[in-house]
Image: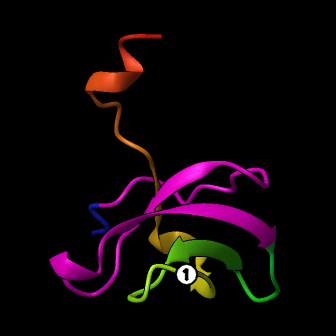
Amino acid sequence: MNSRPDSLLPPAGTLVTYQGKTRAATRNVRVVAEASGGRMIVEAIGRRGQPVRLTVKQANLLPKVPDLFDALN
């Protein structure tokens, strides 16, 4: 049984959470485009502080959880 919600197909420019294999691999990313084979191209901040583009499985993208600053708008 799958414990994750149905996969999400966000439009380009949307902020989402990428859930990797480990808890440390979870990060907030921006969707750039849809790729082939159920994958998405996303942009994140790399180790050196530069933006990097990654291709990740669509099933590993989750909606961004609301936080404190979302309530202020």
How many marks can you see? 1
List x then y, in percent, for residue 38. 70, 80
Amino acid at pointer 1? Gln
Does the magenta segment cover residue 5? Answer: yes
Q: Secondary structure at mark 1?
A: loop
Q: As rendered, which of 2 and 14 lies closer to the eye? A: 14
The answer to which quarter of the image holds residue 24 is bottom left
Instruction: Kindly identify the residue that appears in the image at 57 percent across and 50 percent down.
Output: 15
Residue 47 in the image: x percent, y percent? Answer: 38, 88
Residue drawn at point x = 34 percent, y = 24 percent: 69
Q: Which residue is mark 1?
A: 50
* Side of 18 relative to 34 (left or right): left
Side (left or right) of 39 relative to 22: right
> How was this image coloured?
rainbow
The one nearer the camera, 38 or 30, is 30
x, y percentage for residue 35? 81, 82
Magenta-tinted stretch:
4-33
| Residue 8: image location, x then y, percent | 59, 55
Q: Is residue 11 left or right of residue 69?
A: right
Q: Is residue 4 left or right of residue 31?
A: left
Give the residue at x 68% y 62%: 31
Q: Residue at x 57, y 84 (%)?
A: 56
Residue 13 vertical placement versus 3 (above, below)? above
The quadrant of the image that shows the N terminus is bottom left
Q: Residues within 10 Å of mark 1 (few under 14, many from 20)?
A: few
Q: Residue furthest left?
A: 23
